Amino acid sequence: MRLWYVLLLLPLVGLLYPPIYARETPELFGFPFFYWYQFAWVPVTAALTYFVYRMTRPS
Amino acid sequence: MIESFEPDWTAIVVCILLFGLVTVLGFGAARWKRGDLDLIDEWGLGGRRFGTVITWFLLGGDLFTAYTFIAVPALVFAIGAGGFFALPYTIIVFPLVFLVMPRLWSVASKHRYVTGADFVKGRYGSRPLATAVAFTGLLATMPYIALQLVGIEFVLKGLGISGEWPLIVAFVVLAAFTYTSGLRAPAMIALVKDSLIYLTVIVAVIYIPSKVGGFDNIFSAAADALPKRDKPGALIPSGADAQVAYASLALGSAMALFLYPHAITAVLSSRSQDVVRRNMSLLPAWTFLLGLMALFGYMAIAAGISVAEPNLTVPALFRDMFPSWFFGVACAAIAIGALVPAAVMSIAAANLFTRNVWREFVRPNLSDREESQVAKIVSLVVKAGALAFVLFLPTKFSIDLQLLGGVWMLQTLPAVVVGLYTRWLHGWALLAGWLVGMVVGTWIAVSQEYTPVWDTPIVGATVYTGLVALALNLAVATVLSLLLGGRRAHAADETSPEDYDELHETREPAPAISPVA
């Protein structure tokens, strides 16, 4: 069950290595990639955290 | 360039009315979820009874401070992408907290700890180490409270109010309701403040782009303007230096945030470990809001705003774009927004001083009633100190100290966070590591005129100063623990492993006799 906690490392990997997202393209709704990519991590991280919360909660 | 504004009376009246409403709420809060406010558990932690919704409002209103809402857009306005690290910072902070803070909640609930330093004392049985942790918290919190008043000051400037009396009025209101209602006051005010902030930001994000030609135009205006600044900025951080600085600031700030006393106070005030964990998936709603606010920096560029100092960016933009009455609502949102963190911070500082300094060194046999009385008085002293900061010292002083505050708080990570998992590190080794981290971190920051990143030798990159100091701190603590290994077994530890994992709830009000003697 504790293995689910590993999922919480994904946002760290996705955000703490800027070379993967420090780019202008592709744009979305006028937002350069650098900006919308980071915004996208907000709901993704919330969902991951909620999932881990559900999976690790004692019944 | 805008140096100062004419008074906008409609906005001022709206702002005063909303402020009045909040004042009434703050005093009324004493009656809410009634408890004996002569106990520090009740005054300083709201009886550890806040559920998911209140905790969400309180933590959100507490961590995302008014100053943040002024300073982040201002930084983005001034330097571009570099200021945007606030977004990854406030994203990764919640998974990190999800892993760590429920353990602190459990052990603190079990042993009735009120502060991080209480935990360190119980875990390591080391008074010097606990004092060091308490001292760090007090040192870092004072300028942070001052910055909340600075945030109000910039809003007042935007409204066209000059002079110091409105700030003093705001301060007196804040001090009075914190004194009478304790943590219940900011928790209740947070409901109003947070609604106003959300309203303002959502309206601004829809309305302002429609006036300045959409996000396409906003980003291209920023891309044109940023490289032409005196200190050139950029829309995308390019080059290894800028990117390492960006990532290390995000990581270091995230690790520091939850060590701050005001964060720990808000976490410990929730009803259960489950409330803390569930909130970590709900709090990113605040992150999204902060990200949108950061974009106000670019909107201001597209709107052709030109200000004497970057911190006036948001007030100037709102004043330019909104009708007067809504500008008043927006100003009230930020000004009231300053009250919540300022109140929680002063309560947290008061808890620290009372538990870890006064009780520890002056009055070991403090009764519960006296304890709560001392905390109330200290909360006044702390706020008066913050007001003096703002009135008598240059604003830059508070801002520089707040930067140092993050570096300092990180130095308590080995004792507090590592301590939640293992007792392996030795108390004296942790103290030595802390001292090295504090001295080196402060020295680097000061010698660089308060630039947050340092061109680190050996690593060969520009790294957030706090992380450099933390690395040294951990290295010292580890090496010394190895050397002191044999004596560790004799050290006192009043906690046991199951104290950290237990999923239980606060049901009873605090007992009349505190078991922490």
Image: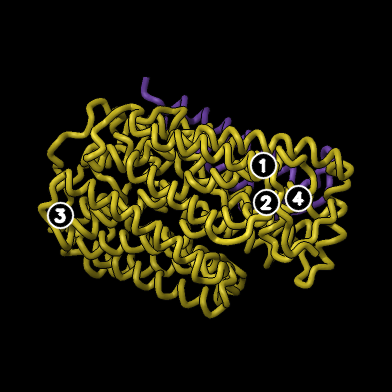
Chain colours: A purple, B yellow
Circles 2 and 1 in contact, beta carbons < 8 Å: yes
Closer mark to the observer between disc 4 and disc 1 = 1
Residue B97 lies, in percent from the top left, at 45, 43
Question: Which residue is at a point 68% across and 39% down the rendered structure image?
Answer: B201
- For marks 4 and 1 on the same chain, the one whose residue lies earlier in the sequence: 4
User: Quarter-wise, where is residue B37 in the image?
Assistant: top left
Closer mark to the observer between disc 3 and disc 4 = 4
- For marks 2 and 3 on the same chain, the one whose residue lies earlier in the sequence: 2
Circles 3 and 4 in contact, beta carbons < 8 Å: no
| Amino acid, disc 1 | Gly
Circles 2 and 3 in contact, beta carbons < 8 Å: no
Question: Which residue is at a point 15% across and 41% down the rendered structure image?
Answer: B514
Q: CA distance from mark 2 to mark 3?
A: 56 Å
Residue B253 lies, in percent from the top left, at 52, 56
Question: Which residue is at a point 71% across and 38% down the rendered structure image?
Answer: B325
Location of mark 1 (residue): B328
Q: CA distance from mark 4 to mark 1?
A: 13 Å
| Res. A23 visible in picture | yes
Location of mark 3 (residue): B492
Q: Which secondary structure, mark 2?
A: helix
Q: Which secondary structure, mark 1?
A: helix
| Amino acid, disc 2 | Leu
Left/right of residue B162 with respect to residue B436 in the rendered view: right
Chain ID, mark 4: B
- For marks 3 and 1 on the same chain, the one whose residue lies earlier in the sequence: 1
